[in-house]
Image (tube, rainbow, N blue to C red):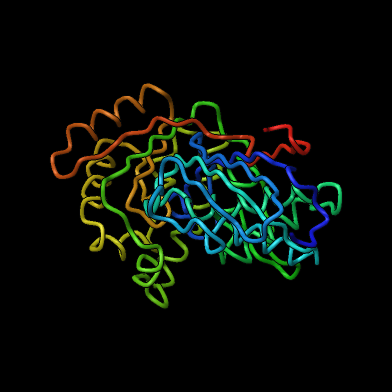
Amino acid sequence: MTDSPLARGLAVTVKVPATTANLGPGFDTLGLALSLYDELTVTVRDEPGSTVTVVGVGAGEVPTDDDNLVVRAIRHVFDAYGVPSPGLDLVARNAIPHGRGLGSSGAAIVSGIMAAKGLLESIVDIDSRALLALATDLEGHPDNVAPALFGGLTIAWTGVDGPQYKKLMVHRGVSPLICVPESTMSTALARSLRPASVPHEDAIFNVSRSALLIAALIQSPELLLAATEDRLHQSYRAAAMPGTDSLITELRSHGLAAVVSGAGPSILVLCSDPAQRLEAAAVVAAHPATRWESLMLAVDFKGATVNAHPAGALA
């Protein structure tokens, strides 16, 4: 038995979208939620500790006990509010690819944060600012967790009051295509390839493109190709992802706004309409160097959701 105030059998269900960060020039700042989801069920039990059942992506690979990232995120919230953690049974149904720049670790963290929010609903009120701060504690920076939490296009930054975000609605014509390779990429490795400083003109270049990208995404999709140019990070990582670099070059030569998705090696193509997305998919299918899975996704505008179920309701 645990000394948790939560009733045995209390359960929550959580749904969290994949994300793509950076979007070209918006390094560590811009993120977009996508219509590909991890789903989680968490049930309070009498026995201490946690057991995780993973279905889909990550099955047989990720920890299935208290070392699981989702469990650690849940415990982090309980500890933050001084509430004893209960024993937990988790069932994770995962669809977001791991190690491919689609925010899988951010989704795991957000899944745990939202599950804790649902479990603690009758005890503490956790607002959006607190959710972002708790998630950023574990992720390290807010650009992936912000869109996973809140959906849509997010601008994230850290100020004197901690991590902050602004959510924007995306132009209805914008049609994302995600190209997923068989290979993976370590986020830590990708970050290590960046230089400690960049030329002043490159910094100015990215500031202008980031501003233009916001306009392109919310108002003028025809500007997406120019708006997704970058000089801060993608070229430095290219040698570690030659297949990604080759396909991005090919796509952009066809006038398509292709960029590295997050830390890679997946590619995000921000198409101005569904017809252009079909054109992009055809270019990917004809590319000879690497096998890619093309995912035609929508922008998720809802973000993470959680629903609580009384004890025994899911039995």
Percent position of residue 131, x then y:
71, 55
Single out the residue that lies furthest toward the bottom.
196
Q: Nearer the viewer, residue 78 or 186?
A: 78
Q: Is residue 278 left or right of residue 92?
A: left
Single out the residue that lies furthest toward the right.
123
Measuring 44% from the left and 72% from the top, which residue is drawn there? Answer: 200
Percent position of residue 192, x then y:
37, 72
Q: Is residue 14 left or right of residue 213?
A: right
Say if residue 209 shows up in the picture.
no
Q: Which quadrant of the view contains residue 85? A: bottom right
Single out the residue that lies furthest toward the left.
288
- The mark tally for this picture is 0
Query: Which corner quadrant holds the N terminus?
Result: bottom right
Q: Is residue 106 left or right of residue 260?
A: right
Measuring 24% from the left and 47% from the top, which residue is drawn there? Answer: 249
Query: Which corner quadrant holds the C terminus?
Result: top right
Q: Nearer the viewer, residue 38 or 263?
A: 38
Measuring 56% from the left and 31% from the top, which residue is drawn there? Answer: 171
Q: Which quadrant of the view contains residue 282? A: top left
Q: Nearer the viewer, residue 205 or 132?
A: 132
Percent position of residue 194, x then y:
37, 70
Say if residue 197 shows up in the picture.
yes
Quick check: 161 above or below 253?
Answer: below
Percent position of residue 306, x then y:
69, 40
Q: Is residue 149 left or right of residue 193?
A: right
